[in-house]
Image: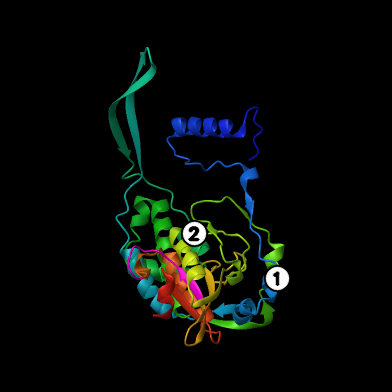
Amino acid sequence: MTVIANEAYDDFAKALQQEIEDDCGVEFKGRIKNSKDRTKINYRKGFEADPRFLEIWEKLKKKTTYRVDYDTNDLIVVASKAVKDLPEIKAPSIRSTKVSVQMTDEGVDTNYVGDKIESYGGYSWKIPDVLGYIQSKTELTRSTIQEILVKSGRISDILVNPQLFLDLASQAIRRTLYSLMIDGIKYQRIGDSDYEMALFEAQELEIYLNDFTFTVSDNTKTIYNEFIPLDSKVESQFAKDCETSDQIKFYFKLPNWFKIPTPIGNYNPDWAVVFEDDKKIYFVAETKDTGTDQVDLSKLKVDEQLKIKCGKAHFNEFEDLEYKVVNKVGQLIE
């Protein structure tokens, strides 16, 4: 959206945010920003010829494709249990809240009077194409979906609230399907297909500087000239520790166009790191903060867990390259 304001930008933005916050009860916390304040991320001149960069880039630049292998009978058993374990499906209802309106010297005021809930239990709903709907969400065959629903023992819930049941059942079946697919996923390299180094310069990046942006002091150890765009405190601390560590010889944040294909969407790993002490080790690191000393994968979102599994399977196809999920630099060699 483009807005042309007839006053100073800062004053206009603050007033607009405050007006929306007052009317809608949301908090912007500075989310409306001036595009002129964006800072261009510049790469260090000549980084692409740096031997330390080339060492690790040559190891991870190959693109891959994947294939999945799962047993349909296993899917039916596990997915039917997932549908069976869905929460109770309740009939649709409409909640109305009644308030009284008073005019005072200060303006219009309201007082809460009460709530009323009108349930549509017992209503005869028009039943949609159940198998077709779930098939559109999962791409499974209609016969497989039918077996899952029959074994779940929850088909009668369709009569209570058709749309809610279809949505929840589709989600449960899809989660089960993805989990089984990724448990058996296999990656293989695609001939001579590489991530093109030219994309570093071709894909210009501009960001709003924030508390997580890392300011580079020693740019000889990375590809960035001044700033590294980051999204979290754990990433910012990781960059700082990489810069000051004697064991980290080179590091950089993998660009957002470096994407690994997975059944649930592309995965963009976090870091490429060259470590050298008694021996040289090349790492691809994923940084996560789960509030624990070690990363507890079970505390991550399901999609994050599955993409990490895919990342591990992808990098298992590369020699002399270790994939690690960590919350600090020191955990790379544990």
- Single out the residue that lies furthest toward the left: 114
> What is the quadrant of residue 317 in the picture?
bottom right
**Any mark on residue 163, and which?**
none
SS for tag 2?
A: helix
Verify CB contact (< 8 Å) between mark 2 and mark 1. no
Residue 303 seen in the figure: yes
Residue 163 or residue 109, whichever sits in front: 109
Outermost residue toward the top in this view: 105
Residue type for callout 1: Gly
Mark 2 vs mark 1: in front: 1
Total marks drawn? 2
Determine the secondary structure under disc 1: loop
Q: In the figure, residue 144 lies in which quadrant?
A: bottom left
Q: Neighbour class for label 2 at 10 Å: few (<14), some, many (≥20)?
A: some
Q: Separation of disc 2 and disc 1 at Cα?
A: 54 Å
Residue under the point 47% across and 54% down = 128
**Which range is magenta?**
284-294
Residue 178 visible to an observer of this rendering? no
Residue under numbered circle 2: 133
Amino acid identity at mark 2: Tyr
Q: Which residue is mark 1?
A: 46
The N terminus lies in which quarter of the figure? top right
Q: Nearer the viewer, residue 265 or 124?
A: 265
Place of residue 131 in the rendered image (x, y in percent of width and height, measured from the top left): 47, 63
